[in-house]
Image: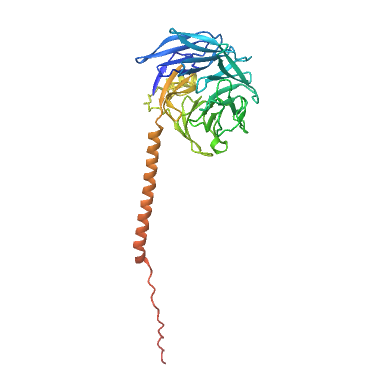
Amino acid sequence: MSLCSFGVEPLSCHAWNKDRTQIALSPNNNIVNIFEKKGKEWVKIHELTEHTERITGIDWAPESNRIVTCASDRNAYVWSLKDEVWKPTLVLVRINRAATCVKWSPLENKFALGSGARLISVCYFEEENDWWLSKHIKKPLRSTILSLDWHPNNILLAAGSADFSCRVFSAYIKDIEDKPGPTAWGTKMPFGELMLEHKDSDGCGWVHSVSFSASGDQLAWVAHSSISVADAAKGKEVTHLTTDYLPLLSVLFVGPTEIVAAGHDCCPFQYTYKGPGALEFVKKLDMPKQSSKTTTSAMQHFRNLDKKATEEDSTKLDTLHQNSITQLCIVSGDKAKVEKYSSVGLDGAMVIWEFKEDLEMSSRKGRGLLIIFGVVLMTLFAAFLFSAVEPYHTPRHTEHTLVDSPRISR
């Protein structure tokens, strides 16, 4: 893993180019900075300044090399690189509230934009008029859209919102794409068709992030105090797991069954999903290093209690991130097998993590097989000893003969 700091300002969102040599991120303002890796340092090479309010979403299309951004100014721009200069094109999103998130489709012929206007704008390029148009998905949305993710078939769209619900819609636009075939989520998919709607009965909070699996048959999402998975291959059955940690803000499928989630605990967590009812916590992925404790004087001890209400002299966390993690992105691989992923946080830092699930899982399976093999051997050995010793401990039955007692003569 590697840590890189981009200042003290919080990083609200980020996106990578195709070869992962450049990264676009926003330091919680109206500017998007593009950095390029030169040696061991990141050097700023571009600055996108068209927005007038805080940037809320960035996504970089790898094949077409276009960047889409959205902000609280209710606008979205598609940026194209021409003559080493990024030029914006305004998108007609037609919203009256702040935009909150944005996501390119897998084929990069459209993108989805969430907003506080209780609707989703599915935007596509109209070649006749040379502009970006949008179609709205409104029902049954009742609150702000907080997160979006596309199904691999380029048609279905998952959305998490502030009304405690996770939904899957059809974003099929007949003007630019062929009629889709049936999926595990449903067969009829006109634009705006609701394929799944799940609202937590116990009110676990806003749905901060959603993520489809590589196959598209599973959908994971995180709320304030829980992580959930809907399995379309199993009748859209939802598996729910309540966590003991602080609220999670981002979730990502990193394998067919492995999930990584992060949030206010400043540390990514690994979960595994093996089927309905089998969603389990695996471990923390940021293990703190053992540090030697220094002795403090009695005077310093009472000063810390007076000023910081703690006995410790340092307020530094044991994790790499020193504040909440806001977003996770894939750096190397795909959702079928992620090798590296990145995280940005409110501490202004970006961390690249290596995911080593295969080696760890294989070692765990190997240890489990060894334990089972050892138990079987011990059982067989104990049975053999018992069968060998048993004849020597069998009690012998002796025949008792009745002997007449002699008569005493007088």
Near-viewer residue (276 or 290): 276
**Residue drawn at point x = 49 percent, y = 38 percent:** 274
Near-viewer residue (242 or 343): 343
How many marks on residues? 0
Residue 386 coordinates in the image, percent (x, y): 37, 60
> Which of the 4 quarters of the picture holds residue 331?
top left
Near-viewer residue (86 or 388): 86
**Residue drawn at point x = 51 percent, y = 8 percent:** 49
- Name the quarter where the C terminus is drawn: bottom left
| Name of the residue lying farthest toward the bottom | 410
Q: Is residue 213 above or below residue 16?
A: below
Asked if residue 401 shows in the view, the reply is yes
Residue 306 coordinates in the image, percent (x, y): 49, 20
**Residue drawn at point x = 46 percent, y = 33 percent:** 256
Residue 24 coordinates in the image, percent (x, y): 46, 15
Residue 104 coordinates in the image, percent (x, y): 52, 20
Asked if residue 246 shows in the view, the reply is no
Q: Is residue 163 left or right of residue 353?
A: right
